[in-house]
Amino acid sequence: MIALLLYLLVGVGLLVFLWLLARRKGAPVEGCGRQFVEARQALRTLQEGLLPDNLIQRIFDRHDFRYVMASSPADIGELFLQERKRISLMWVRRVRCEIRNLMQFHLDYSRLHAKLSLLTEIRLGLDFALLLLACRALRILLYVRGPYGARAVVGVMTAAAARVCAASEKSLAFLNPPALEAFRRDSAGDGAAI
Amino acid sequence: MTDMLILLLWLAGLLLEFVLLVRSVQTKMFARYVYFYAYIFCVFIVSAGLFIGRSKLDFYDAWYWPTQFATLALGFGVVLEIVRQALAAYPGAERFARRASCAVFVVTFCFVEWRIARRVAWSTEAATVELERDLRVVEALVLATVLAIVFYYRIQIGKNVTGMIVGFGTYVGVSLTTLALRSFLGPRFNPVWSDLQTASYFFALIVWTVALWSYNPNPKPPTSGRGGGGYDALVHGTRARLESVRSNLRGVTGS
C-alpha cells in the first residue's frame, strides 16, 4: 500500500510539474540583463537603504515610544504604536523582497558556472529558505505583538542565525583569496557587471 | 474502447509518427534531436510491424513484449535528450541535474532491488508489469528533477524542448499511475490501463507534432555572468551578502 502511494505520488507529482510548465509564461530573454541590473540595485537598496543600523534603531528602539507616552495623551501613544507597527511590517516585507532578489541574483549567475557545486547550492538554498522563513516569522510576530515584541524571540532567531552562520563560516574556509579580490573589485562599481 | 476505435488510434498514431519523421528530415531537426527521433523511428518501425502482423496471433504474442521493452529502454534516450537540450546553455544547472539524476537513479534502483529481494512468490506477468513501472519511476523522477531545476533556476526553454517534456512527461506520468493501480487492483483494471496508455501516447504524439513542426531553439541565456570571478567568488559574494543581511536582522531582534 505504501509503495502504491509512493508510485502514485511520483506520477501525479510529475503531471503537476508538467501542468506548471505548460502554464509558465516565458520571460523575454533580453529582459534577463535588465533583471540582473535590477537585482543588483535591489542589493544596494538592501545594504544601504534598508539595513543600516541607524534606520533599524529608529524603527525598533523603544525610546521614541517612551518619549511619546511620557509627553502625550494615551491615544497619541496608541496612534504612534500603530504607525510604528505599520512601518516595521513594511520594512520586513521590503527586506524579504530584497532577500528574494539576492537569491535570484545568485541563481541567475550560478546556473552559468560549470564549476557549480551541488552541495554548496543545496546549502545556500537552505540558507536562503531559512532566512526567508525567519523574515516571515518576524513579520507574524510584529503583526501579533507589535513593533517592540520581536525582542521576545531573540532566542529562536539567534539559534537560527547561529546555525546559518556556522554553515557560512565553514564554507568561507575554502575561499580563494585572489578570486575573492577580483569579485570585490568588479562588483564594487555601479553594480552593472561582475 | 471499441476495437474499431483502438484500430483508428493505432493508425492515426502511425500517421503522426510518420509526419514527425518527415518533418524532422525537412527541417533537419533529426540531427539536432538525435535521441528523440531515434526513439520515434524505432517506435514507428515496431508499431508498423505489429500492425501488419496483428492478424497472426503467434507473431503478435512473440514480438509484443520484446519490442515493448526495446521501446521502453529507448525511452531513456528521450529523457537524456531532454536533459541535454533543456540545460545545454547552463553548464552549472546541467551539472546539478546530472548529479541529481544519478542520485535519483541509484536511490530508485536500490529501492527496487530491496523490494525484489523481499519477494517470495514470482510470476512473469507481474514481474513484467512491475519492471515497466519501476523503469517509469526512474524516468518520472529524472524528469521531475530536471523540471525542478528548470523552475528553480528560472531557465527558459524553447517550444521544441517544452513539447518533448510535456508529451513524454504526460505519457510517463499516466503510465506510472495506471501501472501502479494495475498492480494493486489486478487484471480487472487491464481495460482501463490499456485505454489510458493508448490515449496518453496519442496525446504525446499530438503535442510532439505541434511542438516540433518547426525548429524553435531554446532562448540564449545572458552572457554577462560568464565573466571573471568564478564560482567560488560568486558563492563567497552571495554568502557575504547573506551574512550582512543576517547580522542586521540579529540587530533587529536584539541579540
Image: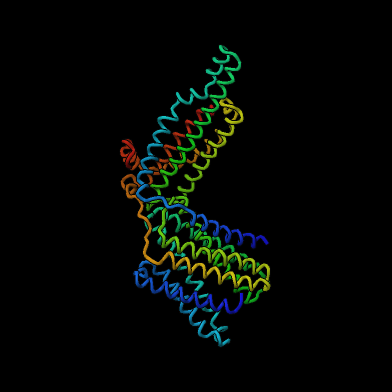
In the rendered image, which quarter is residue B184 located in?
bottom right
Q: Is B89 on the left or on the right of A144, as rendered?
A: left
Residue visible at 42% across and 59% down in the picture: B86
| Residue B56 drawn above or below residue B159 | below
Residue visible at 50% across and 28% down in the picture: B251
- Residue B179 x, y percent position in the rendering: 61, 68
Q: Residue furthest top?
A: A71
Residue visible at 56% across and 11% down in the picture: A71
- Residue A69 x, y percent position in the rendering: 58, 15
| Residue B246 drawn above or below residue B168 | above
Residue visible at 59% across and 13% down in the picture: A73
- Residue B128 x, y percent position in the rendering: 59, 74
State the residue in front, B147 or A20: A20
Q: Quadrant of the N terminus of chain B?
A: bottom right
Q: Is A117 on the left or on the right of B186, as rendered?
A: left
The count of marks equals: 0
